[in-house]
Image (cartoon, rainbow, N blue to C red):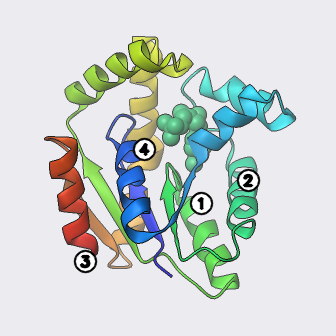
Amino acid sequence: MLNIVLFGPPGAGKGTQAEKLISKYNLVHLSTGDIFRSNIKGKTELGNLAKSYMDKGELVPDSVTIQMLEKEVSANPTAKGFIFDGFPRTTHQAKALDEFLDSISTEVSLMLALEVPKEELIERLLLRGKESQRADDQDKSIIENRIRVYLEQTAIVASYYQSQGKHKSVNGQGSIGEITERLFQVID
Ligand code: AMP
């Protein structure tokens, strides 16, 4: 199996690039943010809980997020591999993912980290907010909080994969096509 963790701060282009990777490598795309948003839309209990954190730009608790992710992986038993987009966001989530994948006799193949400077992230997210109506992209202070949460809780996950020799840094600036080519090169 090819299991890729697509990593990077909010606005780095994970969702856009995940779409390119799934079609080339025939993988299942699991975006925890998308799954939470579809639960919010469907007014489920999980959606209500997630919304209370997402509206502030905080992380949804690990226990809830990990359980949801494991359920989604299990729901795709014939998958050739997965793109994990927006997960793991804490070291605890990264460890849980390793243990879970091990229990189904597979593992994370590599972690691709998209690197984009903070000023460009804020610009991209404000632009996306205008186009997509995503609630957490509408307000600059929520965007800044998400970047702060990324730096305080998520950035450290890179060293977890570095210690396993699986971390690959990719320049996330340039055209969508240029960035996709860089990702293809690293994977191939
Ligand atoms: P995203 O679509 O990846 O930008 O995620 C949007 C929001 O969903 C985040 O700001 C968090 O509130 C929540 N979220 C998504 N993925 C996770 C995760 N792995 N752990 C905790 N919260 C998450």
- What amino acid type is highlighted by mark number 4? Gly
Q: CA distance from mark 3 to mark 4?
A: 20 Å
Q: CA distance from mark 3 to mark 1?
A: 29 Å
Residue 145 seen in render: yes
- Label 4 belongs to which residue? 15
- Label 3 belongs to which residue? 188
- Label 2 belongs to which residue? 68
Q: Nearer the viewer, mark 2 or mark 4?
A: 4
Q: CA distance from mark 1 to mark 4?
A: 23 Å
Q: Position of residue 133 (x, y in %)?
A: 51, 15
- What amino acid type is highlighted by mark number 2? Met
- What amino acid type is highlighted by mark number 1? His
Q: CA distance from mark 2 to mark 3?
A: 30 Å
Q: Position of residue 171 (x, y in %)?
A: 17, 51
Q: Residue at x 40, y 36 (%)?
A: 10
Q: Earlier in the sequence, mark 3 or mark 4?
A: 4
